[in-house]
C-alpha cells in the first residue's frame, strides 16, 4: 500500500505534478487526444473496417485547442505553440464536410427512408427520387 502511495504521490503532489489551472487544461488536452484514438479504435473494431466517427474530430478539435491554450498562455514555448497552431483546421474542416454530407442525404417522399446523396432511386421502396432532392 505504501508502494502504491509512493507511486501516486511524489513530493506531496499527485503523480509528482504541481497541479494548477493551466496544468488541468493541458492534461485535459492530453486526455482528449488520447480518448480520440480509443474511440476510433473501438469504432473500427466494432465495424471490422476502418471508421473515423465524428466524435474523433470533436475530440481532436477540443484537444488541439486545449493544448494550444496551454502552449500560448502558460508555456509560451514557440515549438509547442507551432505544433498546435494549425492542426485544428483539418479537424474543423472534416466536421463541416461531415455535416454537409449528412444534410445531402434524401428522404424518400413515399416511404420516408433516408437515402445516400446522389441516389436516383429509394433504397427501400425503389421509387425514383425527385430531381430537386438529388
Ligand atoms: Zn422509398
Image: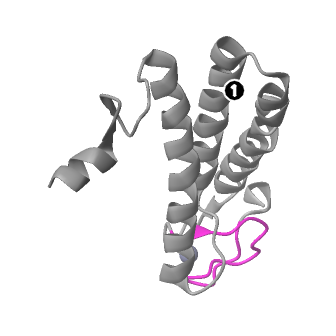
In the rendered view of the protein, which quadrant contains the N terminus? bottom left
Which image quarter is the C terminus in? bottom right
Residue 15 sits above or below residue 117 on the image? above
Question: Local crowd at mark 1 within 10 Å, few (<14), some, or many (≥20)?
Answer: many
For residue 118, side relative to residue 7 (left or right): right
Task: Residue 86 in the image: state x and y as whole percent.
Answer: 84, 33
Q: Please name the residue shown 30% across and 28% down the image.
A: 12
Q: In this view, does 97 lie above or below 22?
A: below
At horizontal 58% and vertical 36% (from top left) the residue drawn is 62
Residue 17: quadrant of the picture:
top left
Question: To which residue does mark 1 refer?
Answer: 68
Q: Tag 1's secondary structure?
A: helix
State yes or no: Cβ of the residue under disc 1 lies below 8 Å from any atom of ligand 1. Answer: no
Closer to the camera in the image, 76 or 66: 76
Task: Report whether 16 appears left or right of 84.
Answer: left
Residue closest to the eye, 33 or 105: 33
Quadrant field for ligand 1: bottom right
Is residue 127 inside the magenta stretch? yes
From which residue to which does the magenta span run?
Answer: 113-129
- The residue sitting at 64% across, 49% down in the picture is 57
Magenta highlight on residue 23:
no
* Residue 13 against residue 87 in the figure, above or below: above
Amino acid at each position: 500500500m505504501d508502494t502504491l502511495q509512493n507511486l501516486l504521490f511524489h513530493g506531496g503532489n499527485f503523480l509528482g505534478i504541481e497541479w494548477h489551472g493551466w496544468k488541468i487544461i493541458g492534461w485535459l488536452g492530453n486526455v482528449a487526444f488520447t480518448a480520440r484514438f480509443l474511440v476510433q479504435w473501438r469504432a473500427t473494431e466494432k465495424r471490422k473496417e476502418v471508421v473515423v466517427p465524428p466524435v474523433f474530430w470533436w475530440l481532436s478539435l477540443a484537444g488541439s485547442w486545449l493544448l494550444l491554450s496551454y502552449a500560448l498562455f502558460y508555456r509560451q514555448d514557440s515549438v509547442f505553440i507551432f505544433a498546435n497552431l494549425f492542426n485544428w483546421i483539418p479537424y474543423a474542416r472534416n466536421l463541416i464536410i461531415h455535416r454537409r454530407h449528412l444534410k445531402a442525404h434524401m428522404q424518400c417522399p413515399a416511404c420516408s427512408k433516408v437515402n445516400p446523396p446522389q441516389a436516383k432511386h429509394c433504397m427501400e421502396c425503389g421509387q425514383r427520387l425527385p430531381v430537386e432532392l438529388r
